[in-house]
């Protein structure tokens, strides 16, 4: 079987099962099986598949058909133009989270150090460290997640200090100019409605924010107030229909702003502590 035929077969399997982006997924999995870039596939479409390539490709097709996300099969996900390693111990970084990074970069003149709470793969913390060269601390309650984040930081050459703790509990008060977080915000009561790939394979601790999705916001916002210096920024990703509940939780903060993503959906909440 040549590469062209293998791709067509993979595409057909995914189309029949309703897998999103069937052709692209087949290309990504075959290139991963071979150990090449996708562009190599197009330049060698008539080349016969070696036995080892076919064995790996077949296994990856089977995993994807069983609902395993492509990113967990390949162990990779791009975020802010960089290649991050991911495992089932961490949430797969989404493009929507880049809006939080953009918000932090736009106000970079107003902060010199930052903490990323619930860092997961380290995507936010590593990106901010590389984009600004500033002191970044990152926390997560999961030691397994921090192992992934530490490996990403080392491989990409970022200086980030990682701590295992619940939110910012291991850190002293008034330590930072910026607190940033993509907290778990999926309501547990809605778990049956989310995508199978997400529900069955991504870590629940990084997904669910209690029955209404607000549990971590209720704890994160006061903890951020403790960690921030006067006038410091809090930046948080927002879940669906979270704007008004989160706005209410930010009572007493200043410069509260809600930013939308490219689809026009509210995606980022920003607020500042009172200045002295």
Image (cartoon, rainbow, N blue to C red):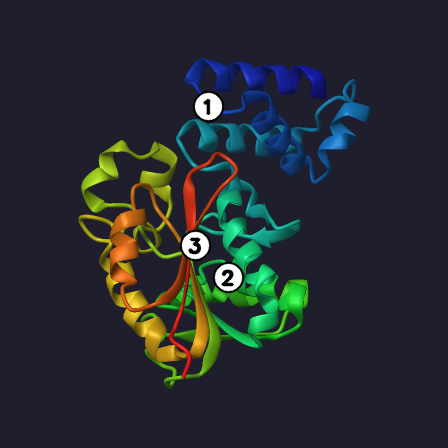
The crowd level at tag 2 (other Cα within 10 Å; few <14, some 14-19, many 20+) is some
Upstream in sequence: badge 3 or badge 2: 3
Residue located at (61% from left, 70% from top): 109
Q: Position of residue 107 (x, y in %)?
A: 57, 64
Vertically, is 259 above or below 20? below
Looking at the picture, tell me which residue is in the foreground, 15 or 36. Answer: 15
Q: Position of residue 31 (x, y in %)?
A: 67, 34
In which quadrant will I find the N terminus?
top right
Label 2 vs label 1: CA separation?
Answer: 27 Å
The crowd level at tag 3 (other Cα within 10 Å; few <14, some 14-19, many 20+) is many
Residue located at (34% from left, 33% from top): 196
Q: Position of residue 205 (x, y in %)?
A: 31, 56
Q: Which residue is mark 1?
A: 19
Q: Residue 175, located in which quarter of the rendered image?
A: bottom left
Label 3 vs label 1: CA separation?
Answer: 22 Å
In which quadrant will I find the C terminus?
bottom left
Q: Residue 152, located in which quarter of the rendered image?
A: bottom right
Q: Position of residue 184 (x, y in %)?
A: 33, 54
Vertically, is 251 above or below 176? above
Looking at the picture, tell me which residue is in the foreground, 224 or 194. Answer: 224
Upstream in sequence: badge 2 or badge 1: 1
Residue 140 falls left or right of residue 60: left
Asked if the residue at tag 2 contacts the one at tag 3, i.e. Cβ–Cβ closer than 8 Å, the answer is yes
Q: Which residue is mark 2?
A: 148
The crowd level at tag 1 (other Cα within 10 Å; few <14, some 14-19, many 20+) is some
Residue located at (37% from left, 39% from top): 198
């Amino acid at each position: 079987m040549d590469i062209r035929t293998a791709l067509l077969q993979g595409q057909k399997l995914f189309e029949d099962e309703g897998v999103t982006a069937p052709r692209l997924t087949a290309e990504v999995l075959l290139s991963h099986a071979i150990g090449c870039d996708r562009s190599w596939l197009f330049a060698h479409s008539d080349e016969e598949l070696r036995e080892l390539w076919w064995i790996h490709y077949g296994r990856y097709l089977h995993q994807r058909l069983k609902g395993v996300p492509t990113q967990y099969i390949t162990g990779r996900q791009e975020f802010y133009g960089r290649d991050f390693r991911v495992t089932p111990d961490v949430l797969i970084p989404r493009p929507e989270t880049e809006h939080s990074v953009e918000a932090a970069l736009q106000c970079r003149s107003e902060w010199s150090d930052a903490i990323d709470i619930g860092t997961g793969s380290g995507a936010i913390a590593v990106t901010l460290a590389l984009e600004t060269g500033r002191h970044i601390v990152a926390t997560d309650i999961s030691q397994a997640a921090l192992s992934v984040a530490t490996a990403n930081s080392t491989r990409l050459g970022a200086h980030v200090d990682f701590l295992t703790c619940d939110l910012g509990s291991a850190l002293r008060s008034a330590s930072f100019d910026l607190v940033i977080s993509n907290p778990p915000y999926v309501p547990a009561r809605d778990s049956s409605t989310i995508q199978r790939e997400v529900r069955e394979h991504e870590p629940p601790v990084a997904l669910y924010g209690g029955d209404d999705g607000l549990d971590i916001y209720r704890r994160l916002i006061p903890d951020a107030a403790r960690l921030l210096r006067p006038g410091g920024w809090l930046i948080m990703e927002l879940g669906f229909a979270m704007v008004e509940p989160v706005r209410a939780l930010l009572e007493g903060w200043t410069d509260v702003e809600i930013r939308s993503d490219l689809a026009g959906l509210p995606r980022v909440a920003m607020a500042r502590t009172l200045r002295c």
